[in-house]
Amino acid sequence: MKRYIIVILLMALAQMVFGNPEIPDDRPVNDSIIVEFGHSGKMVFVIDNPDDFERLKNMDINQIIKELDLPETSKDGELTVVEIKHKEGNKEIVTIYEDKEETEVTVGRYKVIVDEKGSKTKVRLITEPKKEKDPEFRTYINMDLGINTFFENGNIPGGIKPYSTKGWGSWNIGWNWMASQKLSKGRYWDFGLGLSWYNFKLDNANYQILGTENGVSFVDRTDVNGFKSKVSASYLNVLTMYKLDFGKLNDSGKNGLRVAIGPYAGYRLGGRSKFVYREIGGSGRKKDKTSAGGYLSNFRYGLRGEIGFRSVTFYSTYDFNPFFQKPLSPSLSPFSFGLVF
């Protein structure tokens, strides 16, 4: 009775997953290869193509099991594996496991268990969750949110320097349209186009950032009480990165480290400085806003790196060129780090 149930369920599942499987009328006569191993191990290969036979000779047992994507099991019994092909080219692995009291038929995400341990035969249908497919090419949009600082001669300027920045308030914000091309398992080449904003908030709010004929100047405003001093710039950027996903490489899904690195370049769209203060004699808050285009570099280029685990990804960028135009401006290279959403 159980055999009939298995055949009926297998036909129903194959119809559900594939529709009508392709069975060519002019199919050649199959050749069978039987491989025996261990005390009772046996593998039977049905081959109807000489090319497949040549390929089989170059494969080892581990490669065969990996290609069939068979689950590991410690049960005793007989396992039968069948490959069903659809006329559109899709295929699915069907496994039939049989022991004395239980039979399991698996087609894709569907598993039928026929249990004959008791006086009555019990049939259960289990649906596994869909496996996430790794597409060959995909596009997506992400957002950068981090903080900025400057590097001067390989070091972050100390608090005694007028251009020393505050972490809180020196925001780096960016939106990127990304395209990811899969190179091989766990390896990707990403391309991006995006917009980003630099905001540098000075640690000493009494310094006002002004452009002069000789470059940028940080003027100590001893005549007022400064509350906020900052300079900002926006850019249109292009970037590319080589990415390794160790979770995909090791078949552990999202439970693996992701790393990426690559160059970027950008063109400045705008920039301005802002100084907020009160007069010493007493007044409300006043703001001085000036265009910063005359003393900011028009281009930026540098290196971007990312490191992530599960749903959390950190990024950092370093500009190889100075933020301010030369010749007399301080040589300050922006550095940013934060989270990718």
Image (cartoon, rainbow, N blue to C red):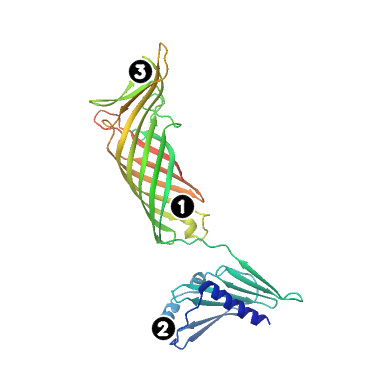
Say which label, 2 or 3, has the lower sequence index: 2
* Apparent side of residue 290 relative to residue 184 in the rendered image (left or right): left
Residue 27 % position (x, y): 44, 86
Instruction: Find disc 3 in the rendering and name its residue.
Output: 221
Q: Helix or strand or loop: what does disc 3 sit on?
A: loop
Q: Nearer the viewer, residue 86 or 199?
A: 86
Q: Height in image: 131 above or below 100?
A: above
Q: Quadrant of residue 320?
A: top left
Disc 3 residue crowd, few under 14, some 14–19, many 20+, Cα 10 Å? few
* Apparent side of residue 192 relative to residue 15 in the rendered image (left or right): left
Residue 282 % position (x, y): 42, 12
Spot the residue most to the right. 119
Disc 2 residue crowd, few under 14, some 14–19, many 20+, Cα 10 Å? few
| Residue occupying image coordinates x 39% and y 42% | 174
Q: Height in image: 116 above or below 127?
A: below
Amino acid, disc 2: Pro
Instruction: Find disc 2 in the rendering and name its residue.
Output: 50
Amino acid, disc 3: Arg
Separation of residues labelled 3 and 1 (CA atoms): 47 Å
Q: Height in image: 96 above or below 335?
A: below
Say which label, 3 or 1, has the lower sequence index: 3
| Residue occupying image coordinates x 37% and y 40% | 196
| Residue occupying image coordinates x 44% and y 51% | 259
Q: Between tags 2 and 3, which lies in front?
A: 3
Q: Which mark is residue 258?
A: 1
Q: Quadrant of residue 125?
A: bottom right
Amino acid, disc 1: Arg
Q: Nearer the viewer, residue 61 or 314?
A: 314
